[in-house]
Image (tube, helix red, strand yellow):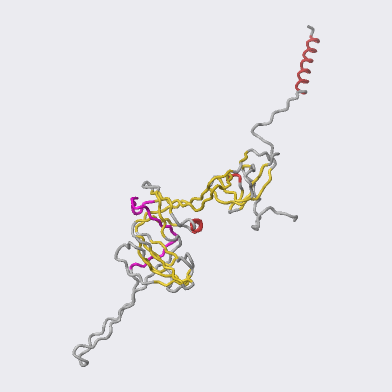
Amino acid sequence: MSEKAFVRVCGLVAVALAATACTSTGAEPLDPGLAPRGTVQTTATPSRQDLSNKVSLTGTVTMNPVFGIVSPVAGQVRYLTVPEATGTPTKPTRFATVWLDGKPNNVEVPAGSTFGGRLVDDRATVTAGMPIASAKYAGYGIVAEINGEQAYQIADAAQGVVQAQIKNGPGPFACTLLGTIAALPAGTVPAPPPVQQPPADPPGGSNAPAPPAPPAPQEPREPETSSQPTGLRLVCTAPADVKLINGAAATLELVTATAQNALVVPVEAVAGGQGRGKVDVVGPDGAKETKDVELGLTDGKVVEIKSGLTGDETLAVPGPNLPPAEPDGRGGPETGSK
């Protein structure tokens, strides 16, 4: 083959290869790790389940813990004279009556506890649920200190039995709550009035020398049964067969609220909180529509939807991004022209 013919053949091969490359109909594949902006990658559907809110508190085994007793109704409290206990009472001790519409409502210290002190003045007007006396439990109890943020969260739950676990000890076991979680002021017990002895005729008649004058009466002091003020606390007692050691650490778990057969969605699908939120509902064509929902209980994994969804929707995960708040605190994006 001549040199010219060789160059011509090579040129035709190069042109053919170039033409094949330029006329290829296959498009370059997209990176499978990327997706067009706005594409929904993960979805979730609502479901139904029983839901409960639980709060864990750190407590300590305490000897003879002090707890508060509240007024059962709104009215005027009238205290009774409570003799100082000489032993652990085996029956309830009545210490006051709250009068409402001319009817008495007796208030008692439960059996196994002694009266600690009055928390309000005699004949004071009180409200229902207001602490009016302190009491001291005779024996071991578990005391958990509570902060103000937890007080309202567990106020309605502090009415029955909680679960307790002693660290490296017995548990879990049912721990029966005592009294109220409200902070208590100092409890006082009025001292008995001094006994007035009638003057007696001196022996030997009126001409006999008078006996020496009795010592001046001392200022009455509060009995040792008065109680010191406390902070917000929860007090509960363990079953009799549970061995407790004073000062041992414990954990208390309270169920603050429950919902049966609640409509729930993953927390990642919801934006917002404190009862109000937003979700992105994905339509058949993949488009998203943001809807307002009313929120209920949550266990940290799912959240209750009280209204706003029927349960048949498909939700985008994660949920919508809420607009940032304005510097003046009004919230929402800035609108209008400057």
Question: Where does the image place residue 304, in percent across and percent down from the top left?
Answer: 57, 48
**Nearer to me, 26 or 210:** 210
The residue sitting at 58% across, 47% down in the picture is 263
Answer above or below: position of 258 versus 223: above
Q: Quadrant of the N terminus?
A: top right
In the image, is 210 to the left or to the right of 283?
left
Quarter of the image that includes the C terminus: bottom right
* Residue 188 on image: x %, y %: 38, 70
Measuring 60% from the left and 43% from the top, which residue is drawn there? 46
Give the residue displayed 46% in from the left and 71% down from the top.
103
Question: On the picture, is 117 further left or further right than 255?
Answer: left
In the current view of this chain or complex, which residue is farthest to the front? Answer: 103
Quadrant housing residue 208: bottom left
Q: Magenta stretch containing residue 88, yes or no?
A: no
Residue closest to the eye, 3 or 85: 85
As displayed, is residue 219 above or below residue 338?
below
Residue 85 or residue 17, whichever sits in front:
85
User: What's drawn in magenta, residue-wise?
Assistant: 224-249
